[in-house]
Amino acid sequence: MGHKQMKKSFSFWIPAKKNKVHVTKLKPFRKQATFQRCLRVTLIIGQLFSLIPVKGVSSNSSADVRFTFKSWKCLYALLSLLLQIFMTVTCLHKLFSSVTSLNATTPVIFYGTTCLTMLMFFKVARAWPGLVHHISKNEDLDPNFDGKLAYKCNITCGIVLLLALLEHILSLLSAFAGAMVCQANKSFYEGFVTHFYPWVFTLMPYSAVLGALTQFIHFQSTFIWNFSDLFVICMSYYLTSRLQHINEKLLAAQGKYLPEIFWKTTREDYCRVTQLVRRVDEVISGIVFISFANNLFFICLQLFNTLEDGIKGNGQCSSRSKVTHLLGGYEAATYFLFSLVYLISRSIAVSLIASQVNTASTVPAPVLYDVPSPVYCIEVQRFLDQVNGENVALSGLQFFSVTRSLLLTVAGTIVTYELVMFQFTSSSPSSTNSSVNTLPNITTTMISSTAMT
């Protein structure tokens, strides 16, 4: 007969050798991905252009964030708003004193939406301290150590602002080239500003100071238009990261036998994050609405002008009739093409990144379906009902929710608009006389030539 031997394991304590020091390796310290740290650079740059006038945006403590009317930031914001209103009024005066058309209304819409955007950001600034305090409490209860979050926000900020600056430089080159042809009888700077901003200098006499002020207002409007998209992107990054933090816990527990307390704790964490998404949406939904509406309008206008006239970049005063030394007479065409590609790319990026909030909120459902039957409990059922029953997403003033399907809806709207406009213009021969591509700081040069006609 064979004899079974039992294997025994013995543990021995071996004293450390003399003069030997045992060092315990510590895990590297990870910084918490807080809301203030991730959006610090974006908010500071926004305040340079009079947006979100709150104190303490560079601080790590939520107690330092506060809003007050008695601050230079608030005064700067109000002064900038008055200047944007001035530009809107001059555009309205030019519109009423000339033939009304779609192209003629473009400057009014551009500066008018800039005023609305500034008002929305002012409303955001008043609610910002309360939002930061609420987010800070959530971070204390469930810290997030996403090391890439701040990096993503800062890199995105740099890319968007760099492309916006390049677009603005191309618009200036296009305006300079047009002024050299259309305003050849004037001095270089006077010809440039009167050609670029005709709605101002048909109402007021030319002066170098007014020209410089008008340039600053226009540059500020351009930045605000780009910053609204950037702000929505960075806020979406943060909210998506908070949801992914919960999803990582769930994916690690998928198919495992875990007690009821785990599902209860995770459900409460998920509930706090969804409440945070709703709280953020209450504050920034106006910015989301203006961002999507602005992009939709200017994409439709730009595509209509492109399909109707092609990428010619030549209006009544074409730089091609007299070749310039900047880009060989193709300044307006280069600017037109770059701005169109940049606008469409930026709009798609905003839609896809903002929709990730909704996508991340649906990840827990498959994990909850895989919970083993022996540990299935009421907390799992409540968790599942919450995931399937709630629509967690950013919205535009509650008119629409930013989901992946929204991008297809917008694309269908654009196609419908183009077909209707082509039918409308083909039935009215007089409407084809105005074949000038216009778009403020998308084709601002062509706006000026339109307004001069």
Image: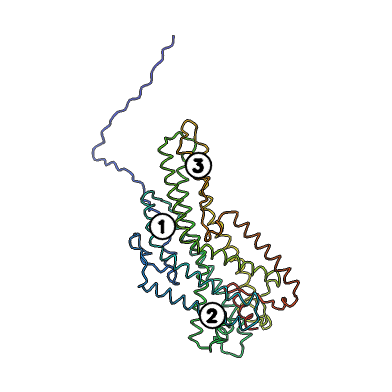
Circle on res. 154 = none
Give the mark nearer the N terminus: 3 vs 1.
1
Give the quadrant of residue 184.
Answer: bottom right
Give the quadrant of residue 449.
Answer: bottom right
Q: Residues within 10 Å of mark 3 (few under 14, many from 20)?
A: some
Q: Residues within 10 Å of mark 2 (few under 14, many from 20)?
A: some
Report the amino acid beneath label 1: Phe
Q: Quadrant of the C terminus?
A: bottom right
Q: CA distance from mark 3 to mark 1?
A: 28 Å
Residue sitting nearer the eye, 344 or 133: 133
In the image, what residue occupies the spot 73% across and 78% down?
A: 430
Instruction: Kindly tell me whether residue 250 is visible in this rendering.
Output: yes
Report the amino acid beneath label 2: Val
Tell me if residue 412 comes above or below residue 337 in the rendering: above
Tell me if residue 383 comes above or below residue 288 in the rendering: above
Question: In what element is the residue under mark 3?
Answer: helix
The residue pinned by badge 2 equals 89
Give the mark nearer the N terminus: 2 vs 1.
1
Residue 452: x percent and y percent? 63, 83
The residue pinned by badge 1 equals 35
Q: CA distance from mark 2 to mark 3?
A: 54 Å
Instruction: Kindly tell me whether residue 36 is visible in this rendering.
Output: no
The residue pinned by badge 3 equals 384
Tell me if residue 124 comes above or below residue 11 in the rendering: below
In the image, what residue occupies the spot 49% across and 36% down?
A: 371
Question: In what element is the residue under mark 2?
Answer: helix
Q: CA distance from mark 2 to mark 1?
A: 38 Å
